[in-house]
Amino acid sequence: MRARLCIPASLADEVQRLSGKKTKTQAIVTVMEEYVRCRKMEDLLALRGKVAIDYDWEREEETELKGTDNENVMDHYFDEIPGLTLVNL
């Protein structure tokens, strides 16, 4: 999207320098993406203590690791595709 904005040149230059981007457009897009990411993180952190989550990440990790030790996880994914034969190379 094209937009006409009044951004102080010194601020745009500093954003470009700090972001390491080649163009001011790339720098401003990067900064905007970072701002959105930070705001979303703040919104999630604001929920701390307000939402009860019963999640046992250690059990989940153990289950995942057990599943990958004995079999190729992707084999089950491709089993359901008709006419597809997997060949081990």
Image: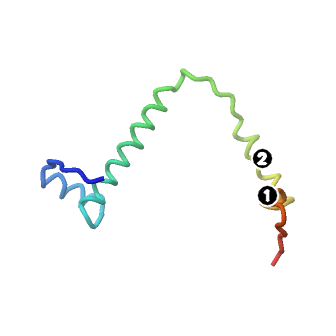
Q: Residue furthest right?
A: 70
Above or below residue 23? Residue 1 is: above
| Element under disc 1 | helix
Taking 58 as reference, is 14 left or right? Answer: left
Q: Residue at x 28, y 58 (%)?
A: 27
Reading the image, the residue beneath label 2 is 62
Q: Residue at x 62, y 23 (%)?
A: 52
The percent coordinates of residue 48 (x first, y second) are 52, 26
Q: Which mark is residue 56?
A: none
Reading the image, the residue beneath label 1 is 73
Q: Count neighbours of disc 1 (C-alpha within 10 A) and say few if under 14, some if 14 to 19, many if 20 or more.
A: few
The percent coordinates of residue 43 (x first, y second) are 44, 31
Amino acid residing under circle 2: Glu
Q: Does label 1 or label 2 sit earlier along the sequence?
A: 2
Above or below residue 42? Residue 20 is: below
Above or below residue 62? Residue 44 is: above
How many numbered callouts?
2
* Location of residue 56 (image quadrant): top right
| Element under disc 2 | helix
The percent coordinates of residue 26 (x first, y second) are 30, 60
Q: Which one is closest to the eye, mark 1 or mark 2?
A: 1
The percent coordinates of residue 54 (x first, y second) are 69, 28
Amino acid residing under circle 1: Val
Q: Residue at x 32, y 53 (%)?
A: 29
